[in-house]
Image: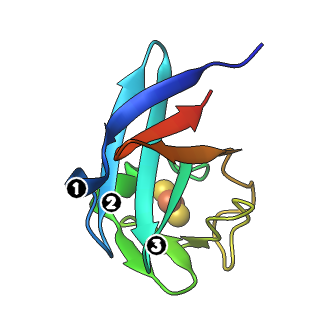
Amino acid sequence: MSDWIKACSVDEVGEGQLFSFDHKDKRILLANLKGKFFATDLICTHAEADLSTGFLTDEGVRCPLHLSVFNLENGKPQNPPADEPLKTYTVKIQQNEIYVEI
Ligand code: FES
């Protein structure tokens, strides 16, 4: 069963920015890529770097540690060393708040 979790307000994640939040044992990354919001797991599948300290590029989020880029739609790594996809989550906006389906 999944739940919609309120993450933050739209204003807290400006275009090109990353944001992280925790919900129970989950650590979630929010990204605003060109005005569209995406949610994935926060922790890199390669060696557990915090992706909110990485960089947002047109191709996705770039891990700060070994520079793999993860596609934000499907979580797939675009380049080594990461080879496992990130889990992705559905996002919706309601009354200026961002909700993530967890
Ligand atoms: S920890 Fe992210 S690519 Fe190595």
Assess disc 3: are there few (<14), some (14-19) or many (≥20) residues with their C-alpha within 10 Å of its C-alpha: many
Q: Residue type at mark 3: give it.
A: Arg
Q: How far apart are marks 2 and 3 (CA)?
A: 11 Å
The quarter in which the C terminus is drawn is top right
Residue 14 visible to the viewer: yes
- Identified at 74% across, 65% down, the residue is 76
**Placement of 20 over or under 35, stated as above or below:** above
User: Is 70 situated left or right of 93 in this image?
Assistant: right
Q: How far apart are marks 2 and 1 (CA)?
A: 12 Å
- Identified at 44% across, 47% down, the residue is 29
**Placement of 72 over or under 94, stated as above or below:** below
Direction left: furthest residue? 12
Residues under numbered marks 1 and 3 in contact, where contact means CB atoms less than 8 Å apart: no
Q: Where is residue 82 in the image (x, y as percent from the top left)?
A: 65, 63
**Placement of 43 over or under 57, stated as above or below:** above
In the picture, residue 72 is in which quadrant? bottom right
Frontmost of labels 2 and 1 is 1
Residue 42 visible to the viewer: no
- Identified at 22% across, 55% down, the residue is 11
**Placement of 38 over or under 34, stated as above or below:** above
Q: Residue type at mark 1: give it.
A: Asp
Q: Residue type at mark 2: give it.
A: Leu
- Residue at image mark 2: 18
Scheme of colours in the image: rainbow
The quarter in which the N terminus is drawn is top right
Direction front: furthest residue? 95
- Identified at 39% across, 64% down, the residue is 65
Q: How far apart are marks 1 and 3 (CA)?
A: 23 Å
**Sequence-first disc among 2 and 1:** 1
**Sequence-first disc among 1 and 3:** 1
- Residue at image mark 3: 62
User: Is 97 situated left or right of 74 in this image?
Assistant: left
